Amino acid sequence: MKLREYEAKNVLKDAGIPVPAGFLIRSADELAPYLGALGDAFVLKAQVDVGGRGKAGGILMAGKADGINLAKDLFGREIKGLPVKEILAEKRLDIQHEYYLSITVDRSSKQPLILFTESGGVDIEITAKEHPKAIRKVIANPLMREIPPFMIRELVGTAPKEIGQIISKLYRVFLEKDVLLAEINPLVTTPEGLYAADAKLIVDDNALGRQGFTINRDLTEREREAEKYGFSYVEMNGTIGVIGNGAGLTMSTLDLIEFYGGKAANFLDVGGGAESERVMHAVRLVCSVPSVKVIVVNLLGGITKCDEVAKGIIAAAIPQKVIVRLAGTNEAEGRVMLAEKGYEMLDTMDLVVKKAVEVAA
Amino acid sequence: MIYGDKKTGVLVQGATGKQGEFHIGLMNAYAKQVGGRGVVAGVTPGKGGKEVHGVPVYNTVREAMLEHDISASVIFVPAAAAADSIMEEANAGIQTIVAITEHIPVHDSMKAIAYAKMEGCCVIGPNCPGLLSPGEVKMGIMPSGLFSRGNVGVISRSGTLTYEVVDELTRAGIGQSTVVGIGGDPVIGQTFVDVLERFGTDPQTKAVVLIGEVGGNLEEEGAKSTDLPLVSYIAGITAPPDKRMGHAGAIVEGGEGDARSKIARLKNMGVPVASRPSEIPQMVRDLFKDHC
């Protein structure tokens, strides 16, 4: 789950990394008491859970005179379709130089990867393409609680030494907060010292509980409801509802829908060993999306039993057409139950998907 | 076969849980069918002295190792304790550790995998269905009825999609040497590169089917690392960016790891990529035609 900028900055501040003086407001009127502390020039930053908010008009430069009016304006805007409910008002920094610092989980080495470059402020992907040598990298050992000094020296190079302390502190945040991506871009030098001018922290979804989060904000309401039942669910915008078991098989079913010229409405993996009640909830959840015209169930039973799946489909009793592919454990029993109720069944995933695309067209 | 054979003695951690008990039964039914040793011991802290399907249960891995000849293990322990189980087994000297458990925090996996590497052990998974060498050994939860013995290796980040492909292969008369589910998490022990290295020295394996999905670039790294003839399939062409598609590792992040660019890179390396699972058997046949 991606933390909002003000949350990420609070985490960094607690870890001893300097961040600009800032205040979170939930209405334009709340800005007034902070105007003194913010000084003559400050920034209003919409706290919305999307990337690229600057280009979408979510960041405004403000001053004492126009601050409250600009905040009103920003609260009235939608940033990439999301309403602005919180704004971070932050003192503007007198920036001398911008650096880039990040710590990620490297899939290839299976260890933390620390990146630092002296040309910050732009996308790291652009720097990687145009000046690959400008990016310094080290891979840390996850069994060590600190990054050894030689690695810090390799990263910092000729940049100000104090950056080394920021790297050490950010690494501690990375370890202690179950972070998958910690990024400070830009990390800036000013006459008053170093500051994390922007900050991004992504916390491992599998560690939200032990990090004290009760909900995953990255999910939509329907996705969160699905999570309660133990489904993996992603909303898309087509007309064919999809239920499968296993992430790979379900993804493959969505791809097959595109292959045959249709559009999937969702990804729903019921998980292993689903019983009839869970299947019923899955079918009802998928059909609750108004655009869904037909539902494909693609089930390869190992620990999941086909008769339980059939029972769940029948119990859901939904108005849309359901086309089913059942294979594996208790396949024959499941097929008999569905056939009695007149459900359409086909033998392979190619056949069910092809049929569903025809029905949806 | 790679990682194990009929003679491999397997230990199960989380032996007395619902999953552990169920799969000890299935693994040993398979061992009986092929004349292998199968699961010889179980471990659940505090349940030492019990039996599961006739398999003795111990409190610690070390105790079980004193009584039995064990070289591999399968872990069904819940996510909060699974990383500790991996380290316990590595410390006790088990060579191949299969972690079935899903939802282990990434930082826990990183530590446990780094520790196991230090101890000279290999970890398969986590969040995986394990592996199966038809006619030899099953370590994990794969439905053995779909498999047949032969000389095609299969490596996959997925569970049921692997079964789908294995089923297609078997129906087409193409048997498998070993099928390895390496897991759907962003951090996994054995990657495509590691498993392909083993297949490279396995005389039984003549070609490999590589089943990948969105997220990362381990598929390309694998393809680059081997001389074995490959067929690939990548799931997730329609996966929207920044959304986790069921697996913790199946996510297109910062514009990286999307299926189309993965497929393009594989094709550039000369690897044929199927556009749907049902095409795989014919592509494998073509591969054998080209190489024989």
Image (cartoon, rainbow, N blue to C red):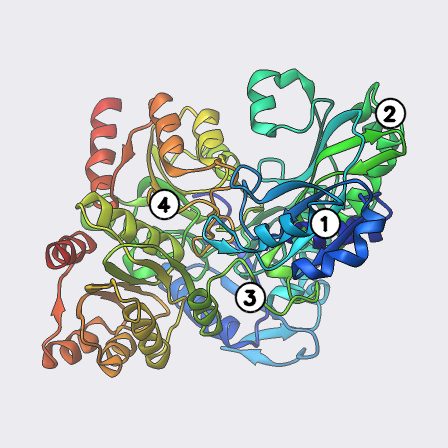
Amino acid type of the residue that numbered disc 3 sits on in the rendered structure: Phe
- For residue A89, the mark is 1
Alpha-carbon neighbours of circle 2 within 10 Å: few (<14), some, or many (≥20)? few
B188 versus A316 height, above or below: above
| Residue located beneath label 3 in the image | B76
Visible residue check, residue A170: yes
**Res B292 → quadrant:** top left
Visible residue check, residue B90: no
The subunit carrying tag 1 is A
Label 4 to label 2: alpha-carbon separation: 44 Å
**Res A310 → quadrant:** bottom left
On whether disc 1 and disc 4 are found on a single subunit, the reply is no
Residue B270 image point, x, y percent: 33, 22
Label 1 to label 4: alpha-carbon separation: 40 Å
| Residue located beneath label 2 in the image | A160
Q: Which label sits in the foreground, 3 or 4?
A: 4
